[in-house]
Amino acid sequence: MEQSKKGQVIALAKADPFLTVKDLAKEAATTTRYVRTILSEAQLSLHEMRRSYARRLQLNAGVIELQEDVSVQEELTITKVVGGKVVPDIPSWAELELFQASIVRRSSSVLCYVQLLTPEQLTISVKPHDLRELLPEWCRAKLEIGGQKAMIQRAPEGLAAALALPEPSQIVKLMTFLTVDDRPVAVELKWFGLEGMILQWSKLQPELEVRLGS
């Protein structure tokens, strides 16, 4: 029985490192003290596991042939969606109802389609400069980049039209995981045309710089 409980705690932690010690204790029907003991004995650090998870979200090469079903909203639109259908990368959001803010805007002079997904209550703004401004103030003050992932895709017809791209075109989908104290609070999705695009990463900056090449 003891070994089974230990195995359950370890399996839960590895499956979703963004769960807290309290969450793990609740899921395994045990105490937080026992969870800490198990993790320590197994030489597992939730903090390091979260960082390792973020590092695995590296830039992926190759073109995805299947078109993604993206419903484009050019003006600021806020809807509700089920977490498991739109953000499978975060298991703890699977059953949550998320707010989804969407808009077509320019980011560093690049025309792109942006979505922000979060379980947090959004602050309504008519024309936000950045969708991250819609997040609660406590959240914005401590916001960090938990990881990024980029994919090259075939542009769906509606998305190509919204971004003024010729057909057929390839697009880059950039996914940014936003965290507070190592816990995911939002996911930002950006789609923009691949032609002439430069993605640049620097150790001095926490996230990729997206710009047009000269």
Image (spheres, grey):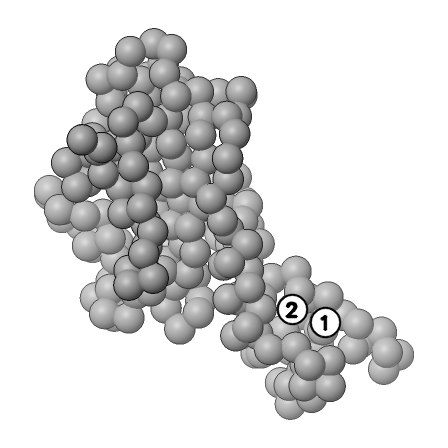
- Asked if 109 appears above or below 144 in the picture, the reply is above
Q: Nearer the viewer, residue 177 or 60?
A: 60
Circles 1, 2 touching at the beta carbon (< 8 Å):
yes
Q: Amino acid at mark 2?
A: Ala
Query: Is residue 99 visible to us here?
Result: no
Residue 96 at x, y percent in the picture:
49, 52
Q: Which residue is mark 2?
A: 13
Residue 39 placement: quadrant: bottom right
- Tell me if I can see residue 15 in this picture: yes
On the image, numbered disc 1 is attached to which residue? 10
Q: Residue at x 38, y 63 (%)?
A: 179
- Local crowd size for mark 1, using a 10 Å CA cut-off: few (<14), some (14–19), many (≥20): some
The answer to whether 141 is drawn above or below residue 120 in the figure is: below
Asked where in the image residue 91 lies, by quadrant, the reply is bottom right
Q: Residue at x 60, y 62 (%)?
A: 16
- Splitting the image into 4 quarters, where does residue 168 fall? top left
Residue 144 as seen in the image, left or right of residue 36: left
The C terminus, quarter of image: top left
**Where does residue 134 sit, x and y in percent of width and height?**
22, 53
Label 2 Cα crowd, 10 Å radius (few <14 / some 14-19 / many 20+): many
* Spot occupied by residue 3 in the image (x, y as percentages of width and height): 86, 78
Which residue, as the protein is rendered here, is positioned at the far top?
Answer: 167
- As helix, strand or loop, the secondary structure at mark 1 comes to helix
